[in-house]
Image (cartoon, rainbow, N blue to C red):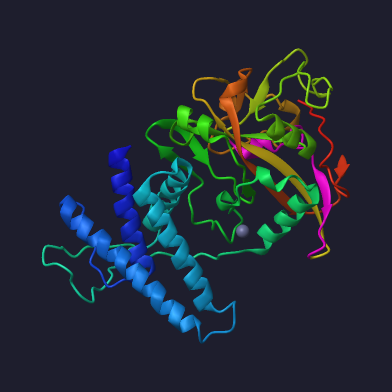
Amino acid sequence: MENKLTKIRRTFAAQLTGKHKLKLIIPHNDSSDSIFEVFINEMFNQLHRKRTKQDEELLRESNRNSPLFIQRKQLQKDIEDFLILNKRQDARAVQEIIERVERMTMLNRKYDIREVKSISQLNTQYQSTIIPTVKMFTVSCSYRALCSELLERFDWPSELFASEYDRCFCKTCYPLTMPNVYQSNIENKYPIIIPRNWMKFGLKIDEVQAKIHQIWNKWAMSYHGTLPNAALSMIKHRQICLPGDKLLDGTHLTIRPGHIPDQKAFFTSPTIRYAAQNHYATPLEFTSQIDKCVYTAKIVLRCRQMPGSFTIQGETLNNSRINGADFCDIIPDEQIEWKTDKRGTVIFDGLCVRLTPVSNQTFHNTIYQSHANQTNVHN
Ligand SMILES: [Zn+2]
């Protein structure tokens, strides 16, 4: 992990040098540690100087949507992310940055690489090198705003959320040129499949649990499609609920009609496309006050799951298959469902929301009022 973090820190420094057009030469991969440290220190100093300069320019700028404001916001985020990587205290935040750097690396491989002309050379020991061009991404999007509106409609306690881990995977925020899947790190053998077209809201998790199990490094990522009430109930219980459980509100959890009887288990999938099938994530109708349009809404819990604690099995939704094609083009149908009955092995770290403009569909539920006080759970 130590070596990996060192490598990530160097790559991130190189990416930021390109992104912010810093006057620096990036050391060759074979350069010594001390050369890299000089480079990283100077990179960080230049980022700070750039921020100071932007702050001075912003004093004369009144339009809060100007490109300069957006650049300043991105620069601030990059400085903060680099500090997190330097301190290495917040394992969850570090893991998010690792994923960010690796996604950017994969993206850059797809773009034409272009030589960046050096303006000044810091140290004669530096060797000129080729660094990829880095694309700038939008900082906010209308899809995110719509999904946030839906979430506000749920009226869940704000204490549940960790908004610093929110992430939108719409086409604008996560373009088609970005990878569909990647390997999170060497200690985690399960792939991470990008939930394209979904908005993920970060959920707070128990730091003790995260630390003792090293969940950000080792646990697999999976998805569990459900209804808002059931999702809220499980988040409040801080663990999965199994059929037969007596819940906080005193009711007994039963197996949902249409699901396999006598299966006292919790089901997830490594791919959100399967977890979000209607059978699990019941479609809801949602009318936005922002654009006055009607949408089909679905919600799916993003889970971190202890490796080796679940059974990998084939899909159990035969009737739902469309045209006989596999649900996912990455995971074969034979391995698409994960089954567990071990409570402490699943942690919810995100709530994923998807909205699709409505066509003639039948809804099982309509979101008109708050669901805050309803805590029924169905398997
Ligand atoms: Zn977006």
Q: Position of residue 4 (x, y in %)?
A: 31, 41
At 69% across and 24% down in the image, what residue appears?
316
| Quadrant in the rendering for residue 44 | bottom left
Q: Nearer the viewer, residue 179 or 251?
A: 251
Query: Within the image, what quadrant is residue 253 found in?
Result: top right
Q: Is residue 271 above or below residue 63?
A: above
What residue is rendered at 57% in x and 59% in y? 173
- Whether residue 46 is visible: yes
Q: Is residue 323 left or right of residue 140?
A: right
Against 320, residue 55 (above or below) is below
Q: Residue at x 14, y 67 (%)?
A: 123
Give the extent of the magenta segment: 271-290
Count of marks placed on residues:
0
Q: Does residue 243 lie above or below 328 as drawn? A: above
Which quadrant of the figure contains the N terminus?
top left
Q: Main secondary structure of the magenta part?
A: loop
Q: Residue at x 68, y 59 (%)?
A: 143
Instruction: Give the residue furthest to the top.
Output: 262
x, y percent for residue 339: 62, 21
Q: Nearer the viewer, residue 272 or 88?
A: 88
Q: Name the quadrant of the C terminus.
A: top right
